[in-house]
Each structure stands twice: as structure tokens, then as C-alpha cells.
Amino acid sequence: MHTTVEMFLHYGYLVLFGWVLLEQLGVPLPSTPILLTAGTLTVTHEMSMPDILIAVMLGAAIADSTWFYLGGRYGGGLTRWICRFSLEAASCIRKTEDMLTRHGSISLLIAKFVPGLNTMAAPLAGQSKLGYRVFLLYDMAGTLLWATTFVLAGRFFGDAVVHDRSIWHWLASSAAGLVVLVVLGMVFYRVFRQQAFLRKIRTLRIDPSELKAMMDRGESVYIVDLRHPLDILPDPRILPGAVRLQPSELIARNAEIPRDRDVVLYCTCPSEATSAKVALTMRRFGVERIRPLRGGFDSWKEEGYPLVEILEPIVTHP
């Protein structure tokens, strides 16, 4: 048997544990190829499905529990820091916040199937003050569902080729190379998609100093706060004159947005992801003078520009 396969069979459960642990900690190492490989090897009984699932769940439990604790302790600052190094930074925070707000702990059952959400779900669950026991129960159920799905898919593929020994031997000799190619392909695709998105929004942004100058000159600027309620809780303030709207609300009410003056959107996402995506969508509705605020709320606050307290209650549940 090929040396790389022998190594995987000898250290396979340790590899699975370490790989899943690193991915859930935020390292861009997609686990799907390795789970499929492990599932394929269960056909010849060289790996045990129960042991595979135990290794995966143990790695996920350690990583997710760590993020849950850190999310509860450090809040939104931690999640934004994670997203700066995530290949899904353009949407990971907002998607997970929306899922947790709408569906609560049940959303953890599918979080691992969605790129970006699998890393962000645990710290945001901690930030939302979800009980640890409830979190761990749903998180492990979701991990079991996720791992079982891909291991069974690998086993199904293995069943299809095991009867053709020539294909089986080719796969055995090429397993390591195939896994590496698939992982690199997934990473490069995510990097390419993120960079394409950033190139789109680069020319749209408005600097905090430019917005402040417009306000000082008395120009009529329509400012929209797109932050999620979970992001507002640590600092319940808003830019002067800003209107609080969720992205879906703003898009649904696009006809009410003025076309004759500048519209500035801000959020707390890395690279102003939420604001930029909404701005691009609104432009398709004919709102041409719409721009995301560079650096969002945090950049405005760091510059020492004025903020006003939010007086109405901040609702974090539907």
C-alpha cells in the first residue's frame, strides 16, 4: 500500500482530530476532503466510522468551547478580529447574527455546513449569553450531523469504486495529492471571491473625515445604521441624525430612500462588508449616491467624532 495511505491509516484519527480542531479555530483548512477520505476508507474497514465521529466531535468541542468562552468574555471585538483573518469575512458575522437571532440555538445544527458560519457561530453564541450546556448540546448535534453527512458520502463513493481494483489502487496512490489539490482549490476560490468583492467596493467608500466635513457644512446626508442589535449592545450610540434599519428593511423600502442627496451606510463588519453589499444592491434599484463608510462605526468612534445615545430599547430577538 502507498506510503501516504499507510501514514493516514496509522495516524488517521489523530489527523482528523487535529484538522477539525484547526479549521474550527479559524485556520483555512476545509475539512470536507479529509472527511470524505476517511469515509472512503471505512468501506474496507481500515477506519471505523464511530471512531471517526468521536475524533471529529472531540476536535470541534475543544475549538468551539474555546471560542464560546472568548466570545462571552470579549464580545464583538473578538468576532470582528476573527473575521479579519477569515476567508468569508464579507458575510460571516452578519449571517451568523441573523441566524442566531431568528432561530436561536437550533441554528447551530446547520452552522457547520455554511462556510464562515462554522467558525463564527460559537463566539457569537457566547456573546449572546446562550447557556453553555445548551450551546454544547446543539453544537455537538450539529457537528455529528455535519461529520456523518460527509463520512457517509465518502463511504458511498468508496462502495462505487471498491469493485474496480484499478480505480481503487489509483485512488490509494493518489489520495494525498487529491486531498491537497481539493483543499488548495477551495482556499484559492474563497480568496478570489473575497478579493473580487473588495475590488468592487474600493471606489465606493467614503472616509469618516469626508462625512464629518459634509455634516459640518450643513449638507443634507441620509445616514443609515445597519448594525445588528448584538453589535449595538456593547456601545448603544449612533451617528448624529442616523436612521437605524436592518439591511432587509432598507432594501424592501428602497423607494423611500432619497435619490437627490448622498446616502451613507455604516456597520461594524470587516471591510464594511454589510454596508458595501447593501450599497451595491441599492444601486441596482437606482440609488446612485450611496456609499459605505470606510471603517464603519468603529472608525468614526476612533476619530473622536460625535455620537449620540440610542434612547429606544434594543431588541435582539424577533
Image (cartoon, helix red, strand yellow):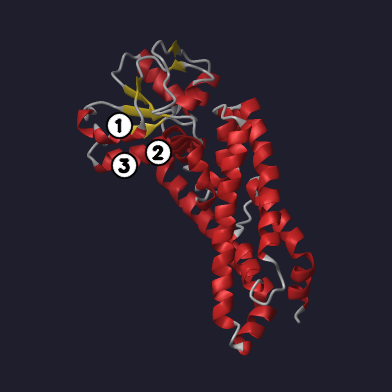
Q: Whole-percent x and y of residue 264? A: 35, 28
Q: Residue at x 31, y 13 (%)?
A: 218
Q: Are marks 2 and 1 in contact (CB under 8 Å)?
A: no
Q: Nearer the viewer, residue 291 or 227?
A: 227
Query: In the drawing, what numbered circle is on residue 250?
Result: 1
Give the amino acid at mark 3: Thr
Q: Whole-percent x and y of residue 310? A: 42, 13
Query: Which of disc 3 and disc 1 is earlier in sequence?
Result: 1
- Secondary structure beneath label 1: helix
Give the amino acid at mark 2: Ala
Depicted 251 relative to depicted 305: above or below: below
- Find disc 2 in the rendering and name its residue: 276
Query: In the drawing, what numbered circle is on residue 281?
Result: 3
**Distance (Cα) linking label 2 and label 1:** 13 Å
User: Tag 2: Cα neighbours inside 10 Å, few (<14), some, or many (≥20)?
Assistant: many
User: Tag 3: Cα neighbours inside 10 Å, few (<14), some, or many (≥20)?
Assistant: some
Q: Whole-percent x and y of residue 275? A: 40, 35
- Of badges 1 and 3, nearer the viewer stands 1
For residue 32, say whether it is visible: yes
- Secondary structure beneath label 3: helix
Q: Quadrant of the N terminus?
A: bottom right
Q: Are marks 2 and 3 in contact (CB under 8 Å)?
A: no
Query: Which of disc 1 and disc 2 is earlier in sequence?
Result: 1
Give the amino acid at mark 1: Leu
Image quarter of residue 39? bottom right
Q: Nearer the viewer, residue 317 or 282?
A: 317
